Amino acid sequence: MKITKIEIITRANKLDELKEALNEIGVLGMTVSQVYGSGLQRGHKEVYRGRSYDINLVPKIKVETVVCEIPVEKVLETAQRVLRTGKFGDGKIFVYELSDAVRIRTGHRGAEAIMDIPGEKPEG
């Protein structure tokens, strides 16, 4: 079974809406990071204590998830629907094919490593 990593870089204020929409299509596991970057926006100017500064890196979030059962196109369509405002800064989505994955606790590999184990619940 094919394993795919999807990386979404977008505006921080869209995180809750994106998480909810991905959960609705069955994407439950994800990693979220605060990141800084520049693309077509190229940053902006800010004034601090009377001096003008170029802010070249814009704060964003990066959402990473790995899927094997959920169609990649469904994830891409969902993310675009939620994140598209039509303005600069909506972000980018990157798609990677993975050769393998390992669940450290059990040793499961491949698609088994990222799928839920029926009847198993995390402790705590």
Image (tube, rainbow, N blue to C red):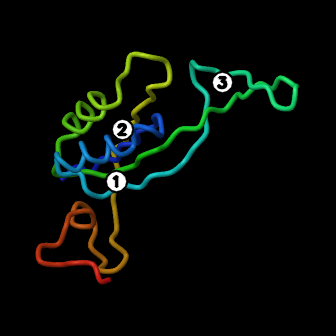
Answer whether labels 2 and 1 touch (C-beta < 8 Å). no
Q: Residue 103, percent across and down?
A: 33, 71
Please, is residue 65 above or below residue 113 in the view? above
Residue at (87, 26) in percent of width and height: 50
- Between label 1 and label 3, give the one nearer the viewer: 3
Label 3 neighbour load within 10 Å: few <14, some 14-19, many 20+: some
Residue at (50, 51) in percent of width and height: 33
Q: Quadrant of residue 95?
A: top left
The residue tagged 2 is 95
Label 1 neighbour load within 10 Å: few <14, some 14-19, many 20+: few
Q: Residue 87, percent across and down?
A: 45, 17
Please, is residue 27 above or below residue 44 in the view? below
In the picture, the quarter occupied by the C terminus is: bottom left
- Between label 2 and label 3, give the one nearer the viewer: 3
Residue 99's disc number: 1
Mark 2 or mark 3: name the one nearer the start of the chain: 3
Q: What kind of element bears circle 1?
A: loop
The residue nearer to you, when weighing 41 against 50, is 50
Direction from residue 89 to residue 84 in the image, left or right:
left
Instruction: Kindly report the distance in space between the C-alpha atoms of the residues bearing marks 1 and 3.
Output: 36 Å
The residue tagged 3 is 43
Mark 1 or mark 3: name the one nearer the start of the chain: 3
Direction from residue 39 to residue 14 in the image, left or right:
left
Instruction: Kindly report the distance in space between the C-alpha atoms of the residues bearing marks 2 and 3.
Output: 25 Å
In this view, the residue farthest toward the front is 49
The residue nearer to you, when weighing 98 against 124, is 124
Instruction: Give, as a three-letter code, the residue at label 3.
Output: Gly
Residue at (22, 60) in percent of width and height: 111
